[in-house]
């Protein structure tokens, strides 16, 4: 990783926050710019970097311009998706929350994750389908819909990994607040609930952390009103010691990056040995041989996907019609066996 490109990216996204001289956009070194763009694209930060480059008077030519046009189009699709959800919720009388987002930095996610009450799940899915969305995937581990000109929508009604609830539904709904994405208001979560959910999802859901995730964690801390609420909730769900371990890991990264001016190779996977060892920090976790095998297999599969994406191979595989479906089916199947779930309905088919 090129250190100058890394520092340039940080100074562009966090002007004045990383070092006294940051915020300047004066480099003319094409290699620094290309490395900054590469890191930004790999970490979900191309939108804010591109904006800063354009605001500073730079032009994006050729390949970069095409990438930027796609990014702008996807950002428009994001806002269209949120407006669609707002209208559907209001028209159908069903509450929802945008979750698992990184609300402090405007960016383009791959999908929009929403939470609905368990008893509203089927009605909510029917509502979205009546309004033109198609059910793309339905299982206990994944329920997704997609429509033209919008991002994929993943629907949750519980946060369950390894056969147990990691954040109570009451806590999440009790943490509701109005959030804004690029000027579009929508129901979301407090900083504390967002931090807690993204922390455990990054660890047990994705098994990785991006620079976008890290910077959002740092900024969320500045919004905390009750920082002890997170550990209380984790303790009530039996994973306070794991919470402490993950926060310590973030604190070390923050010290390296924000205080010492060092680098960390984002995006990065949590090492499999670290993940498996950390299971011992979860109170009364009971996994049988089948669940443990599925857990280890899912970690291995996620490692493969992660490295394919970083090598730029994943986009090519997505063009093969069978590859994404095969990967999703295998990944969701392993997560179902190991006890992960997004909804208590266990993936029942929902008739529109």
Image: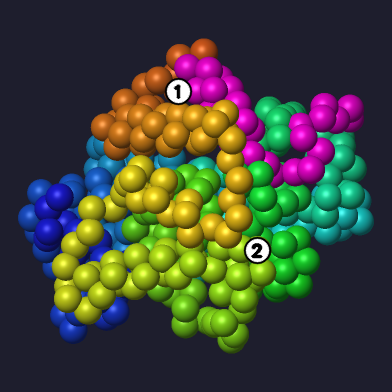
**Residue 335 lies in magenta, yes or no?**
yes
| Picture coordinates of residue 184, whole percent (x, y) | 65, 64
Mark number displayed over residue 86: none
Comparing 183 with 187, the one in front is 187
Q: Tell which circle, 2 or 1, labels the residue nearer the N-terminal end.
A: 2
Locate residue 210 relative to residue 22 in the image: left or right. Answer: right
From the top left corner, tell me how far across and down residue 262 is, in percent. 16, 68
Q: Residue at x 34, y 72 (%)?
A: 251
| Disc 1 target residue | 318
User: Residue 27 location, x and y as percent?
Assistant: 11, 63
Is 59 drawn above or below residue 350 in the view shown? below
Colour pattern of the rendering: rainbow
The residue under label 2 is 237
Identify the residue at image location x=75%, y=43%: 343
What is the quadrant of residue 191 in the picture?
bottom right
Left-right relation of 303 to 189: left
**Residue interval drawn in magenta:** 323-352
- For the C terminus, the image quarter is top right
| Element under disc 2 | loop
Q: Quadrant of residue 64?
A: top left
Q: How far separated are the C-alphas under marks 2 and 1?
A: 37 Å
Give the answer, above or below, for where 229 lies relative to 143: below
Image vertical order of residue 67 relative to residue 45, above or below:
above
Q: Is residue 14 shown in magenta?
A: no
At 89% from the left edge and 27% from the top edge, which residue is drawn? Answer: 351
Picture residue at 72% right of the left edge, 30% below the top: 138
Q: Is residue 25 left or right of residue 340?
A: left
Asked whether 178 or 67 is in front, the reply is 178
């Amino acid at each position: 990783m090129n250190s100058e490109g890394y520092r340039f990216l940080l100074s562009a996204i966090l002007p004045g926050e990383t070092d006294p001289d940051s915020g300047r956009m004066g480099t003319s070194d094409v290699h620094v710019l290309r490395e900054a763009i590469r890191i930004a694209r790999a970490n979900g930060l191309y939108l804010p970097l591109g904006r800063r480059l354009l605001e500073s008077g730079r032009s994006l030519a050729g390949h970069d311009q095409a990438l930027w046009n796609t990014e702008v189009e996807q950002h428009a699709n994001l806002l269209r998706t949120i407006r669609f959800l707002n209208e559907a919720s209001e028209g159908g009388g069903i509450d929802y929350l945008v979750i698992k987002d990184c609300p402090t930095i405007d960016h383009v996610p791959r999908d929009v994750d929403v939470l609905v009450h368990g008893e509203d799940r089927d009605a909510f899915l029917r509502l979205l389908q009546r309004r033109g969305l198609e059910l793309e995937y339905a299982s206990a581990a994944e329920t997704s819909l997609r429509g033209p000109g919008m991002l994929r929508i993943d629907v949750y009604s519980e946060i369950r990994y390894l056969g147990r609830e990691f954040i109570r539904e009451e806590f999440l709904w009790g943490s509701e607040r109005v959030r804004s994405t690029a000027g579009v208001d929508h129901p979301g979560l407090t900083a504390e609930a967002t931090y807690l959910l993204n922390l455990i999802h990054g660890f047990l859901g994705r098994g990785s952390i991006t620079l976008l995730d890290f910077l959002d964690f740092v900024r969320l801390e500045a919004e905390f009103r009750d920082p002890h609420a997170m550990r209380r909730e984790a303790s009530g769900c039996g994973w306070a010691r794991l919470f402490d371990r993950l926060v310590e890991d973030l604190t070390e990264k923050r010290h390296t990056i924000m205080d010492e001016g060092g680098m960390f190779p984002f995006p990065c996977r949590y090492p499999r040995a670290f993940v498996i060892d950390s299971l011992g920090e979860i109170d009364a976790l009971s996994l049988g041989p089948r669940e443990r095998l599925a857990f280890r297999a899912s970690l291995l599969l996620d490692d493969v996907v992660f490295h394919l994406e970083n090598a730029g191979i994943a986009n090519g595989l997505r063009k093969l019609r069978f590859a994404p479906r095969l990967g999703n089916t295998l990944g969701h199947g392993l997560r179902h066996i190991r006890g992960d779930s997004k909804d208590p309905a266990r993936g029942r088919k929902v008739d529109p």
